[in-house]
Amino acid sequence: MKAADIRAKSADEMKDQLLQLKKEQFNLRFQKAQGQTESAGRVRLVRRDIARINTIMGEGKTAPATAKNAEVKSPKGKRK
């Protein structure tokens, strides 16, 4: 799954996709523990997709720093 595909989804769709991926991750871990895993690479892809969705969902929560809300601090002690 590409980041552009995730960004095109709404917040509810992303939450649903995240829930589905977490269920799949659980099932893959369970299969791995029992030695029934057919595709070992799928575990890695699912883990990365979960991280991708979490990152994109987190981007919406933080506001970018602009000149209006950025605070410039001067150093406490100047060295000479």
Image: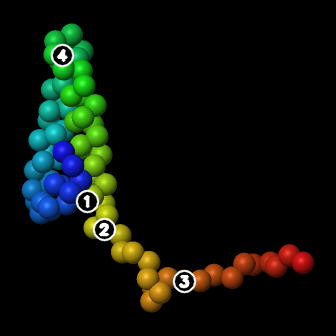
Query: Which of disc 3 and disc 1 is earlier in sequence?
Result: 1
Total labels drawn: 4
Say which element carries label 3: loop
From this view, report whether residue 53 is shown above or below residue 34: below
The residue to which callout 3 is attached is 71
First of labels 2, 3 by sequence position = 2
Q: Residue at x 27, y 37 (%)?
A: 47
- Nearer-N-terminus badge (2/4): 4
- Please identify, in this view, whether the residue under mark 2 or under mark 4 is nearer the observer: 4
Verify CB contact (< 8 Å) between mark 2 and mark 1.
yes
Q: Which mark is residue 37?
A: 4
Q: CA distance from mark 2 to mark 4?
A: 37 Å
Where's residue 65, x and y in %?
44, 78
- The CA span between labels 4 and 1 is 30 Å
Say which quadrant the N terminus sits in. top left
Crowdedness near tag 3: few (<14), some (14–19) or many (≥20) residues, C-alpha within 10 Å:
few
